[in-house]
Image (cartoon, rainbow, N blue to C red):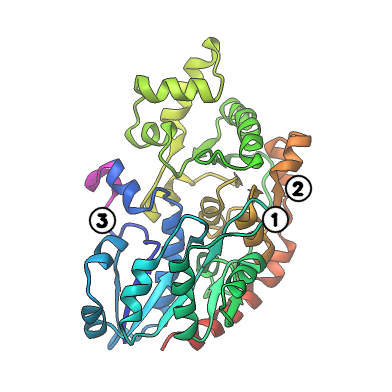
Amino acid sequence: MRYLMIGAGHFLDGNDKQSNVFAFNDLLKQSGGNSGNYMIGEGVRFHILDFMDNDTDTFEYMPWSKFRLTTSAQLDENYDQVILAGANMINEKADFSFAYNKLAATSLPIFAMGVGAQAENYSDGIKVPTGTINFFKLIDERSASIGVRGDFTAYILESMGCSKVEINGCPSYYINKNNKDFYIEKNCEILNSAFLMKRDRNKYKSDMLLKEYQSAALRECIDKNFKLVVQTDYAEASTAYNKVMVSEPWGRLKKYFSIKKEEEQKFNNFFINNTGIYFCWDEWVDFLKGVNFSYGARFHGNMVALMNGIPALNITHDTRTKEFCETLNLPYIDIESLDKKYMTSDELYDYANFDNFNSQYGIMCKKFDDFLRLNLN
């Protein structure tokens, strides 16, 4: 079998250390503007490679930029199955007409997993572009089932006319499926935490609540010498990557966090020395060495920590993050709760309960393997 993966990309490979090979803007563009997207693609790649017969099967990832330039005839000639690494693909703006038109002209089976829809809350509908509806109806026709993040995404897909939907969260959740002893244990007395901020959206009420909470939480992180993980192109990202502060992003940071004159030096030092953005799995994991708790509003950043055995608590702020946690038995707290009462990192650590995760992880992995076998031809 010749497997072609499209959609979310995977982490950089081998010796391609990010700082030695690529410019920051190029890396960010390749990730779709969010380094956490690589965790999605990494999960999909892991499962395909784990399933493959290395003597006869082949695997290739094709970014959307190359996919757009590839003809339907070339796809038919060079591949036997297309696998979509899904992300936040079902919304009012994303139009996948180009993918539908190209793949509809092939005879290839198409398999999708990790597909997500996003709205502010579960009661909201989504006006999905026709091209995206057609794309997922095509996948529905050419696969045994479509893997989606949770009940809300399943409902949206079914309203689009897709009948074969399976709820199983994100493929990255299952990358420890072959480790029978994998579980999450809380046993630390002194926290050394990694905090994950989200501030690349100003659309929902939750975004303003996040701003207020994160401003306070960041000051706690600085006072306790914690680490900060960033994933998108905001001022702290370029500073973390280049390890130098320049005037333009510093001005934006001071404004957003209302940094006072007497706070400037410690904020500056923290963003340079304690902050990281990563596009390579090994470098991300290295940054987390010594961390014993991860928390914040970035689901896939928390997933990197969790899959390395680090307790992680998600702060949910929309349907996407909440349905992920509900599907995968992950502890979470909604940003509206934190708006009512600020909780310190110690309080959040005590709040996080992994009993359901630990008891269900092996069962979930078995079900996901069955889903893979059903869909991988």
Amino acid under disc 2: Tyr
Check disc 3 and report the residue beneath it: 15
Amino acid under disc 1: Pro
Task: Classify 315 as above or below 265.
Answer: below
Residue at the (50%, 81%) spot, across then down? 140
Of residue 337 and residue 265, the one placed in the foreground of this image is: 337
Check disc 1 and report the residue beneath it: 331
Is residue 21 part of the magenta span, yes or no? yes
Check disc 2 and report the residue beneath it: 351
Residue 34 point in image, percent of width and height: 43, 49
Amino acid under disc 3: Asn
- Whole-number angstrom distance, CA of label 1 to CA of label 3: 35 Å
Residue segment shown in magenta: 16-23
Name which of mark 1 and mark 3 comes first in the sequence.
Answer: 3
Residue 20 image-quadrant placement: top left
Number of residues whose C-alpha sits closer than 10 Å to that of mark 3, classed few (under 14), some (14–19) or many (20 or more): few
- Whole-number angstrom distance, CA of label 2 to CA of label 3: 39 Å
Image side of residue 110 versus residue 261, left or right:
left
SS assignment at label 3: loop
